[in-house]
Amino acid sequence: MSLFAQSTPEARGLGMTSQRARDRLIDRLEAEGIRDRRVLDVLRRLPRHLFIEEALSSRAYEDTALPIGKGQTISQPWVVARMTEALIEFSVPQRVLEVGTGSGYQAAVLAALVERVYTVERIEELLRQARRRFRKVGIENLRSKHADGKLGWPEEAPFDAIIVTAAGAQIEHALLDQLAPHGVLVAPIGPPGEQQLLRVRPGENGRISEFLGKVSFVPLLGGVS
């Protein structure tokens, strides 16, 4: 599991990207209900400013989503924290599939907590950028693929957990098929303005679906570009 490279001045940050700025973000997340210390510690260490364009780096530790190009965003830190703690609440999965690499930030958070992360991105340019960021912060327990995320990564299935970072009308059957019997899936579902965060987890008589609150994500699209 990655502990992130903090040795360079760029990673340590300065002013609005400094450790003090990260600490203030963590204080806000705690005040807004994030309780899992493992997740909070990772977000405290992870240099989010390296996952966005330099022009926006002064806003990296605001609790807000930011554009990353191609009509996509880096998720709000609270949403990243909430989805991550929902994924690991009952046990820490060993192998996690992420659908929608985007900036790479959510995958980086997961890589610090689980044994292996597999991440799929449909937009090749975004994936290239994310791969550079993974190398920059020293993440080694992660594999990435340019492919249609709706199809998952069947060659590597089953997964102990699946996290989806874009909203579909429902959970894709292909993803549920790649989830291990004991596995947990966390994903936003619903149309814009009506999206809910859904968690699917094992229960006594099959899988349990539960809604965890309102969220706002870009739509889950098929194909590649």
Image (cartoon, grey):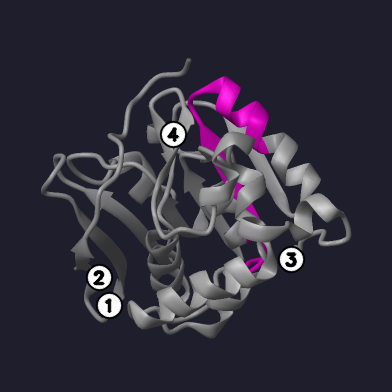
Rendered position, 124 above or below 149: above
- SS for callout 2: strand
**Circle 1 sits on which residue?**
203
Residue 149 image label: 4
Q: Residues within 10 Å of mark 2 (few under 14, many from 20)?
A: few
**Where, quadrant-wise, is the N terminus in this rendering?**
bottom right
Q: Could you tell me if the residues under marks 1 and 2 are in contact, i.e. CB atoms within 8 Å? A: yes
Residue 1 image label: 3
Q: Residues within 10 Å of mark 4 (few under 14, many from 20)?
A: many
Q: Residue at x 58, y 61 (%)?
A: 110
Q: Residue at x 51, y 50 (%)?
A: 59
Q: Give me the C-alpha separation between circle 1 and circle 2.
A: 5 Å
Q: Give me the C-alpha separation between circle 3 and circle 4.
A: 24 Å
- Whether residue 57 is visible: yes
- SS for callout 3: loop
Q: Could you tell me if the residues under marks 1 and 4 are in contact, i.e. CB atoms within 8 Å? A: no
Q: Is residue 49 magenta?
A: no
Along the viewing direction, whichever of 44 and 167 lies nearer the viewer: 44
**Residue 148 location (% of width, % of height):** 45, 27
Q: Earlier in the sequence, mark 2 or mark 4?
A: 4
Q: Earlier in the sequence, mark 1 or mark 4?
A: 4
Q: Give me the C-alpha separation between circle 3 and circle 2.
A: 31 Å
